[in-house]
Image (cartoon, rainbow, N blue to C red):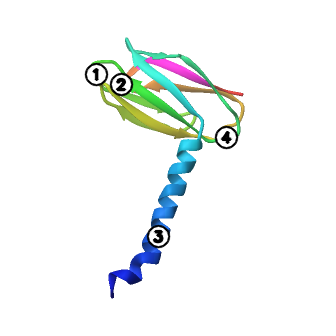
Amino acid sequence: MRWTSLLPVLAFVGATAFAVTARADAMPAFHLVLQNHKFEPATLKVPAGTKFKVLVTNHNPTPSEFESTDFNREKIVLPNTTITVFIGPLDKGSYKFYDDFDHATTGVLIVE
């Protein structure tokens, strides 16, 4: 098989990757910071019925684990790094999240 016969496949893969990236970029983004073993802000208001992303930055000297059993997510956040957590769509209500490595560090998503 010649490589030129793969050009249509490669074009499709490239277009698909661009579409996925464009959708992720178009998603509403919200920011959380872990600092002094607290989420800032501790309450985050997000839209109901839509997918969104939360960027979690850890300014603590130790790893954290962003976790929620309410919206089924968990992801480790190393010190001085930012992770992206894709969430939703969610119904209106309150959804708790916490640092699984430090259960005193909590927050809530208010979905409106």
Disc nearest the viewer among 2 and 3: 3
Q: Mark 1 against mark 3, which lies toward the viewer?
A: 3
Mark 2 — residue?
101
Query: Residue 62 has which mark?
Result: 1
Instruction: Describe the element under mark 2 as helix, strand or loop.
Output: loop
Residue 68 visible from this viewpoint:
no
Confirm whether the magenta stretch covers residue 89. no
Q: Most extreme residue toward the left, as rendered? A: 61
Identify the secondary structure beneath mark 1.
loop
Indicate which label's residue lies in the foreground, 1 or 4: 4
Q: Quadrant of the C terminus?
A: top right
Q: Amino acid at mark 1?
A: Thr
- Please, is residue 60 above or below residue 1 in the view? above
Residue numbers of the magenta segment? 103-109
Direction from residue 107 to residue 105 in the image, left or right: left
Marking on residue 11: 3
